[in-house]
Image: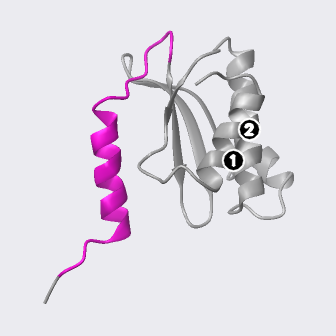
């Protein structure tokens, strides 16, 4: 009998492989994205210092109040707009995008596009 590896384990391995090449610095931090079945999360991280500079997710009350659902493409786009706006206000212009092992389509793509429209460059 052939045993199959779960989708989450495959995603985690993809993320580990990509993280070997993606490093956030103080000048160009990492925009890390995670999505669960119910929510989407985005963080701007300085890996050298080991600190999270900014964060936004659909769990935040002000973000959740603007949304009908927290797990669709529109919610991801709104989180991207929020994180992009916060980053520009904090003086962060360029980031390295870390898709977290997820395929670059749907919610991940919507978040990235909205962050770009808010002023982030990657």
Q: Is residue 71 above or below residue 93?
A: below
> Do tag 2 and tag 1 residues touch (Cβ < 8 Å)?
yes
The mark found on residue 12 in the picture is none
- Would you say 41 lies left or right of 21 here? right
- Judged left or right of residue 53, residue 110 is right
Q: Residue 46: x, y in percent?
A: 45, 21
Q: Is residue 37 visible?
A: yes
C-alpha distance separating marks 2 and 1: 6 Å
Which residue position holds label 2? 114
Q: Which residues are magenta?
A: 3-28
Residue 51 at x, y percent in the picture: 45, 24
Within 10 angstroms of label 1, few (less than 14), some, or many (20 or more) residues? many
The residue depicted at 33 percent of the width and 35 percent of the height is 19
Q: What kind of element bears circle 2?
A: helix
- Of 108 and 51, nearer the camera is 108
Q: Name above or below for residue 110 compared with residue 29.
A: below
Q: Is residue 23 left or right of residue 57?
A: left
In the rendered image, residue 18 lying in the magenta stretch gets the answer: yes
């Amino acid at each position: 009998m052939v045993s199959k590896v779960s989708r989450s384990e495959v995603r985690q391995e993809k993320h580990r492989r990509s993280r070997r090449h993606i490093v956030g610095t103080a000048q160009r931090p990492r925009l890390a994205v995670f999505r669960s079945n119910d929510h989407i999360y985005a963080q701007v991280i300085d890996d050298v210092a080991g600190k999270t500079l900014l964060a936004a997710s659909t769990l935040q009350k002000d973000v959740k109040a603007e949304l009908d659902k927290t797990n669709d493409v529109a919610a991801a786009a709104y989180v991207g707009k929020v994180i992009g706006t916060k980053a520009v206000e904090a003086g962060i212009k360029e980031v390295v995008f870390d898709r977290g092992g997820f395929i670059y389509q749907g919610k991940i793509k919507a978040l990235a596009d909205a962050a770009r429209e808010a002023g982030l460059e990657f």
